[in-house]
Amino acid sequence: MNNVRKDHLLATLAKGVRYDGRSFQEYRPISIEYKISSKSAEGSARVKIGKTEVVAGVKLEIGEPYPDTPNEGTLMVNVELLPLSSPEFESGPPGIDAMELSRVVDRVLREGEALDFEKLCIESGKKMWIVIVDIYPINDDGNLFDAAALAALAALRDTHFPAVADEKVHYGKLTTTKLPLKHLPLSCTIVKTGDAFLADPSRVEREFEDARLTVGVLKDNMICALQKGGDAGLTPEEIHHMIALAQEKTQELRRLFP
Amino acid sequence: MTYTQRFDGRKIDELRPMEAKIGVVERATGSAMFRIGKTYAVAAVYGPRELYPQAMQNPLKGRLRCNYNMMAFSGSGERVRPGPSRRSKEISLVTEKALAPLVDLTAFPSTVIDVFVELIQTDAGTRCAGICAAALALADAGIPMKDLVSSVAVGKVGGKIVLDLSKEEEDHPDGATDIAVAMSTRTNQITLLQMDGEVSADDLKEALQLAKKGCDAIKNVQIQALRDRYYQEGNNE
């Protein structure tokens, strides 16, 4: 049955048509809503890419810097694939898909230097800010990678430091100081299905992908993260092509953050 | 010190502003969001679907399985550690018990109906908001129900019985009694009753009457949400 469905998808793509009528490199409409949990989180956002919906929230804690980076704060990224968001996700401890997703979003933000880690240091070797981003899909209609990375970035941009008095964090009382952001790394996922290269894969397209490449791209088109997925291999030419597509698409996505 | 004026200016028997919406998770069989004040819950129903391990199956009727979870950033203080806690497991259980008497699962033997409740933001009354959302999601999923379930907290704050406590009221310096109630207003059944604090039998009577009043108002909002969803689609039954 799945072979029949895959053959149909491939035949459709061979005619240059996607099921939802998009061109191959076209994203579905994207919307970003800020402060969706502003009473409890220090920063929060909801991102919709078509029918895919992801929420992210940021909490800040004070901790001790790692011995090898005494002058830097740190970042933690956590994605939980809620069984609320898809019949394919199951309850229980995070599976390998959730871990990969967490780590890829983490890599894009960390290596793309979304945060200025040095400005998150409070007292050298003693105290630093720990920035924790928790990401949850509400509805999975494909391309959770880009949706999660966008939601995380939007939530970080929305984040204000909480007030601190007597060495304690006063949650619920936000200051006017925003999180020190440095760069704006964006994630773009391209899948290869048959001979087609598709940006922003929908759920069906992801189901039948041969190979996937998630690319983290900075404003100057520098690449800050890569993650290949899927069962098939990719030739170097294919990879270069996919990266070029990702660079082009992230330039468009950048308009979401004026 | 008696509590004469509520912190947020509400009347003694006044609910916080509410919002309900059906069909917020496209992949689910049924789904809904319910917001009361700053407490914001989303619920999704999956099923009836096969239940594993098989030993858990009941050949006479389907099983209702609820899972309540607070998102890590949704608490009022520090980050909530992800994963089930003793608190979330207990709330999952009482949510199940609050809904089960009103759903008829005899048509779905050996299956499970999964209800997932996620809290995006919390400000008191999270289990009640979760139950209101879950009841709507079950209705949206087309599960046969004898009635909707509506839920609200009542309690005694500074000597006054009040409806729909806020977090600030729960933390009242003179202490507060918090009573979570869920009911089917049509069949007049109370399906959730939890209390911590101290209250006389007379006060409890008054509190439950107030809860009934609150649940009536909540049910109107729930019914309106279902109407908004299904009349729109031209399904004028």
Image (cartoon, helix red, strand yellow):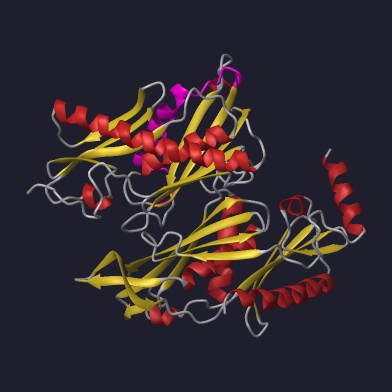
Q: Is residue B28 visible?
A: no
Residue at the top extreme? B60
**Image location of residue A174, percent across then percent down:** 32, 70
Q: Residue at x 84, y 73 (%)?
A: A237
**Image location of residue A111, percent across then percent down:** 56, 75
What is the count of numbered marks?
0
**Image location of residue B36, percent across then percent down:** 38, 48
**Magenta-drawn stretch contains B96:** yes
Q: Is residue A15 visible?
A: yes
**Image location of residue A36, percent across then percent down:** 46, 60
Q: Residue at x 74, y 77 (%)?
A: A248
Image height check: is A40 above or below B219?
below
Q: Quadrant of residue A129?
A: bottom left
Q: Quadrant of residue A38?
A: bottom left
Q: Residue at x 42, y 43 (%)?
A: B84
Quadrant of the image containing the C terminus of chain A: bottom right
Image height check: is A24 above or below B176?
below
Q: Residue at x 52, y 69 (%)?
A: A154
Q: Which residues are magenta?
A: B81-110
Q: Quadrant of residue A213?
A: bottom right
Quadrant of the image containing the N terminus of chain A: top right
Residue at the bottom extreme? A220
| Residue B43 shown left or right of residue B163 in the figure | right
Q: Which of these two is toward me, B47 or B40?
A: B40
